[in-house]
Image (spheres, rainbow, N blue to C red):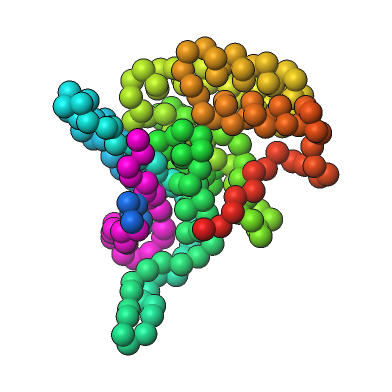
Amino acid sequence: IRLGIGFFFYQRTVFGRALDKYMGDGIMALFPGEPVDALNAAVEFQRQIQTLNYGRIRKNLNQINVGIGIHSGDMILGTIGEKGRMDGTVISDAVNAAARVEGLTKLFGANIMISGLLLSQIPNADYFNMRYLGKISVKGKTEALDVYEVLDGLPLEAAEYKIRTKKEFEASLELYFNQRFVEAKALLDSIFQSGKKDLAADFYRKRTAVYIEHGVPEAWQGTEIMETK
């Protein structure tokens, strides 16, 4: 079961790394240095979770799953509230976008997801294993974000499967965005039914089925609109 949801966030300020706040079963952490610091922390976080789960499996306990979303951008950091209740926090559209990226981890069955903006700021990004998952847009905003799933930190079997099927998965998305839905669905069906239940493949195969039957909305560009929380 998914017991923990959190997201890391990279920001440019004069402050050091900090845990900004706890949010129920989630956290928000700030990384003012290099964007890769946040990604490295997320991968190591997931590896520690896997170590913890090995012990839980031996004790016949439920595994812990954590979804992490990472984005980059400018923000305002300070104290908000009034005399009776004050709280230090960060606010900006970038913070909201980071939360949306994190929110997609459950939908796509991903442990770590990052935005294309963050990816563009990471030198030697080929060091990490990742695959493209499409575009998202927060409802009320016109600018869409490319999002990627980082496969490092996954359990070995799951990581190997997604790396092995990456080429076919990304080819199916290219067909999907070009509205070649019948071909895309055939490829996605093959990926989904090949033994591992890939939730990202399942998401897009269901989308293709709808578009094959009903057609696409006017001015469709393949962007998924995410509701704000």
Quadrant housing the N terminus: top left
Residue 115: percent from left, percent from top? 52, 44
- Residue displayed at 37% across by 46% down: 5
Q: Magenta stretch: residue 10 in it?
A: yes
Residue 133: percent from left, percent from top? 56, 34
Frontmost residue, 116 versus 147: 147
Residue 88: percent from left, percent from top? 33, 72
Q: Magenta stretch: residue 92 in it?
A: no
The image quadrant that residue 201 belongs to is top right
In the image, the segment drawn in magenta is 1-23
- Residue displayed at 67% across by 43% down: 223
Frontmost residue, 99 versus 40: 99
- Residue displayed at 40% across by 22% down: 159
Residue 207: percent from left, percent from top? 67, 32
Extreme residue toward the bottom, this view: 83
- Residue displayed at 36% across by 17% down: 157
The image quadrant that residue 219 belongs to is top right
Lateral position of residue 44 relative to residue 105, left or right: left
Q: Can residue 134 be seen in this view?
A: yes
Frontmost residue, 200 versus 150: 200
